[in-house]
Amino acid sequence: MTIQAHIASLEKKHGALEDELQNILSSPSSDDREIADIKRRKLRLKDELERLKASTRH
């Protein structure tokens, strides 16, 4: 997998997590632990995306 393909894959996963987070937040019985877990996973993906994007600039 090329770096660009990997970045695209991570961006897709990040978007899917954002959609999942929005669905949970709109639910009246949202679980705080699940929300925190999704936010952590999104942050890990974002960090990896930034690292990969920075490596392609050099």
Image (cartoon, rainbow, N blue to C red):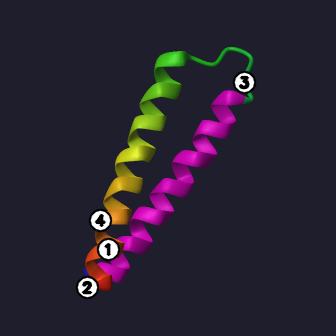
Q: Measure the alpha-carbon separation of dots 2 and 1.
A: 7 Å
Q: Is residue 50 left or right of residue 38?
A: left
Q: Measure the alpha-carbon separation of dots 1 and 4.
A: 5 Å
Indicate yes or no whether the magenta region holds residue 7: yes
Q: Quadrant of the rendered structure where residue 8 is?
A: bottom left
Checking the image for residue 27, the label placed there is: 3
| Few, some or many residues within 10 Å of mark 3 (<14, 14–19, 20+) | few
Vertical side of 3 occupied by 31: above or below: above
Secondary element at tag 2? loop
Secondary element at tag 4? helix
Name the amino acid type tagged 1. Answer: Ala
Nearest to viewer (mark 4 / mark 2): 2
Q: Measure the alpha-carbon separation of dots 4 and 2.
A: 11 Å
Name the residue beneath numbered marker 4: 51
Of labels 4 and 2, earlier in sequence is 4
Residue 26 spot, x, y in % from top left: 74, 29
| Few, some or many residues within 10 Å of mark 4 (<14, 14–19, 20+) | few
Circles 2 and 1: CB distance less than 8 Å? yes
Checking the image for residue 58, the label placed there is: 2
Q: Quadrant of the rendered structure where residue 57 is?
A: bottom left
Circles 2 and 3: CB distance less than 8 Å? no
Q: Quadrant of the C terminus?
A: bottom left
Q: Is residue 7 left or right of residue 19?
A: left
**Which range of residues does the magenta coloring cover?**
2-25
Q: Quadrant of the N terminus?
A: bottom left
| Few, some or many residues within 10 Å of mark 2 (<14, 14–19, 20+) | few
